Amino acid sequence: MVAIVESLCQTAELKPGDRVKNLCGSLHGVIVRLLEDGRVVWRPGSTPSELTALPESLCADEEPKA
């Protein structure tokens, strides 16, 4: 529980290519680009779909396990 709160308190410094996941951990993906208004465009999994999110709704993800 403490780790979740601490991760929310961190300032998100995301850049294209970073691996991210949504806060509930159900979607994992890669940042595609950052928009001028501060939103993040990211691609979940290996799908061609792109999602737009606020940086506060994403957190850094670990490298995929082999």
Image (cartoon, rainbow, N blue to C red):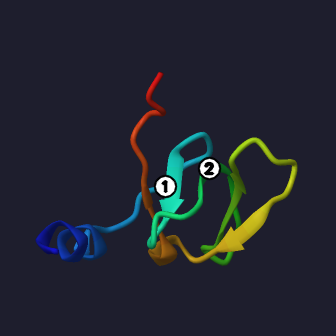
Q: Quadrant of residue 6?
A: bottom left
Q: Which residue is mark 2?
A: 29
* SS assignment at label 2: strand
- Judging depth in this view, the residue of 38 and 48 nearest the camera is 48
Q: Residue furthest left?
A: 2
Identify the residue at horizontal 87%, vertical 48% (top origin). Answer: 48
Q: Nearer the viewer, residue 9 or 66?
A: 66
Label 2 vs 1, first from the N-terminus: 1
Where is residue 28 shown, x and y percent of the image? 57, 53
**Left or right of residue 48: residue 12:** left
Classed neighbour count for the residue bearing mark 2: other residues with Cα under 10 Å, few (<14), some (14–19), many (≥20): many
Q: Specify the amino acid type for callout 1.
A: Leu
Residue type at mark 2 is Gly
Q: CA distance from mark 2 to mark 1?
A: 13 Å
Residue farthest right in this picture: 48
Image-based side of 62 in relation to 29, left or right: left
Query: Which residue corresponds to the image point at 75% horizontal and 66% vertical from the top-left?
Result: 51
Q: Percent x, y for residue 49?
A: 85, 57
Question: Residue at 39% of width from left, 64% of height from top?
Answer: 12
Q: Quadrant of residue 10?
A: bottom left
Q: Relative to the observer, which residue lies in front, 37 or 4?
A: 4
Q: In which quarter of the view is residue 7 placed?
A: bottom left
Q: Is residue 60 above or below residue 40?
A: above
**Mark identifier at residue 14:** 1
Tag 1, which secondary structure? loop
